[in-house]
Amino acid sequence: MKYGRTVEIQVPYAQAVPRVKQVFKEHGFGTLTEIDVKKTLKEKLGVDTEEYLILGVCNPRLAHQALQIERDLGLLLPCNVVVRENRGSTIVQALDPQVMVKVPEKPELESVADQAGRAIDAALEQLATEAGAVRPSSLR
């Protein structure tokens, strides 16, 4: 099962991170958390990796709608956006909201997943258009 939507933008990581946050905000997603995977792996394991950030983004209206249908759905909400370095460009990935329909097998979540998917795709498309994308797989 495909579970992510991805674009690779021709922008250095340090410039991409604030832009990703801003674009997702413009599409209704606030950034609630940030996990610096590179820093954590270095501190905890002594491992060096590429820049890798997990943003916890949320669209409160859509999250509320989904949780009204399935209270356990917090485990599957499409809230993670990954921003990672890739040889001078940056990969931006988001969870495909259809996962929250397929895993619990709740077709009544389809409308919420569709709305979230449109907003995520719009954010990824905006990033791709602004910065030049390498095959935006979210739109394949």
Image: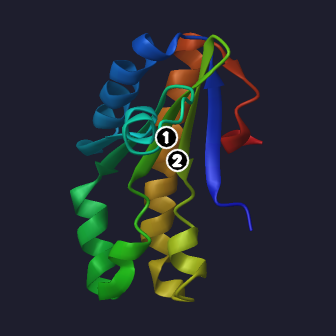
The dot on residue 64 is: none
- The spot of residue 137 in percent (x, y) is 72, 39
Left or right: residue 81 compared with residue 23: right
Q: Earlier in the sequence, mark 1 or mark 2?
A: 1
Name which residue type carries label 1.
Val
- The spot of residue 25 in percent (x, y) is 28, 35
Q: Residue at x 36, y 36 (%)?
A: 24
Quarter of the C terminus within the rendering: top right
The dot on residue 82 is: 1
- The spot of residue 89 in percent (x, y) is 62, 15
- The spot of residue 107 in percent (x, y) is 54, 85
Quick one: label 2, few (<14), some, or many (20+) residues within 10 Å? Answer: many
Left or right: residue 131 compared with residue 134: left
**Disc 2 designates what residue?**
94
Element on which disc 2 rests: strand
83 over 131 or under it: above or below = below
Name which residue type carries label 2.
Ala
Q: Which residue is situated farthest in the front direction here?
A: 46
Q: Quadrant of residue 112?
A: bottom left
Q: Nearer the viewer, residue 81 or 133?
A: 81
The reply to whether discs 1 and 2 touch (Cβ–Cβ < 8 Å) is yes
Q: Nearer the viewer, residue 6 or 68?
A: 6
In 3D space, how far apart are the residues under numbered discs 1 and 2 (Cα atoms)?
6 Å
Q: Residue at x 58, y 18 (%)?
A: 129
Q: Residue at x 29, y 86 (%)?
A: 71
Left or right: residue 7 compared with residue 16: right
Decide if residue 28 is in sight here.
no
Colour convention of the picture: rainbow
Q: Residue at x 32, y 49 (%)?
A: 56
Q: Quadrant of residue 128?
A: top right
Q: Quadrant of residue 26?
A: top left
Decide if residue 42 is in sight here.
yes
